Image (spheres, rainbow, N blue to C red):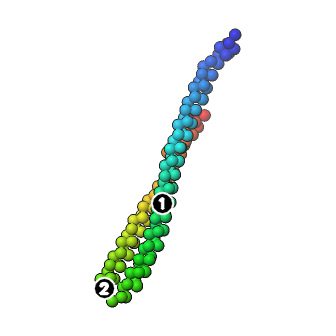
């Protein structure tokens, strides 16, 4: 004897089973999305580390060249001074480019897991509406 059939709760159980399966699939999708965004975040942090190291190295070189340019400025030949200032300017330009790239990557880091947060917020709204 099938008590579920006699009590008439087959439909209710089927709906709950379908909801649980749908919830499991949705959770699996959200976990996959979070993993993809975590990989993206790791790549972004790695790029930031590389830019910081490069920026620190170029800063040392730029300051050394700038100091050398100031010293050479007071030597006898004006051509040496122009070359030294051009070299120092080139290093400063490279430093500025790296700084801009670092700032660009850092601004993007503030949007970590944006897709996952949006999907979870949407899911939460749907759950609240059903309740």
Q: What residue did someone put label 2 on? A: 78
Q: Nearer the viewer, residue 14 or 43?
A: 43
What's the mark number on residue 29?
Answer: none
Q: Secondary structure at mark 2?
A: helix
Sequence-first disc among 2 and 1? 1
Q: Nearer the viewer, residue 56 or 44?
A: 56
Q: Residue furthest top?
A: 1
Compared with residue 47, is residue 71 higher up or lower down, i.e. above or below?
below
Q: Residue at x 60, y 29 (%)?
A: 20
**On-image quarter of the C terminus:** top right
Q: Badge 1 local density, few (<14 within 10 Å), some, or many (20+)?
A: few
Q: Residue 101 at x, y = what percent? A: 42, 61
Location of residue 61 with respect to 13 vertically, above or below:
below
Depicted 33 relative to depicted 93: above or below: above
Give the position of the N terminus as an image quadrant.
top right
SS under mark 1: helix
* Residue under the image location 51 percent in, 47 percent down: 39
Q: Residue furthest left?
A: 79
Name the residue that disc number 1 marks: 50
Report crowding for label 2: few under 14, some 14 to 19, many 20 or more residues within 10 A (C-alpha): few
Q: Where residue 69 appears, x then y in whole percent?
A: 38, 81
Give me the residue at 44% from left, 65% from top. 99
């Amino acid at each position: 004897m099938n008590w579920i059939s006699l009590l008439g709760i087959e439909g209710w159980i089927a709906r709950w089973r379908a909801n649980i399966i749908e919830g499991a699939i949705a959770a699996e999708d959200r976990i996959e999305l979070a993993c993809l965004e975590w990989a993206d975040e790791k790549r972004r942090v790695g790029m930031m580390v590389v830019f910081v190291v490069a920026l620190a190295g170029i800063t040392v070189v730029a300051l050394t060249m700038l100091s050398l340019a100031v010293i050479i400025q007071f030597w006898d030949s004006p051509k040496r001074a122009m070359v030294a200032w051009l070299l120092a300017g080139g290093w400063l330009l490279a430093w500025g480019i790296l700084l801009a790239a670092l700032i660009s990557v850092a601004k993007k880091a503030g949007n970590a897991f944006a897709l996952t947060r949006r999907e979870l917020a949407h899911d939460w709204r749907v759950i609240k509406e059903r309740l």
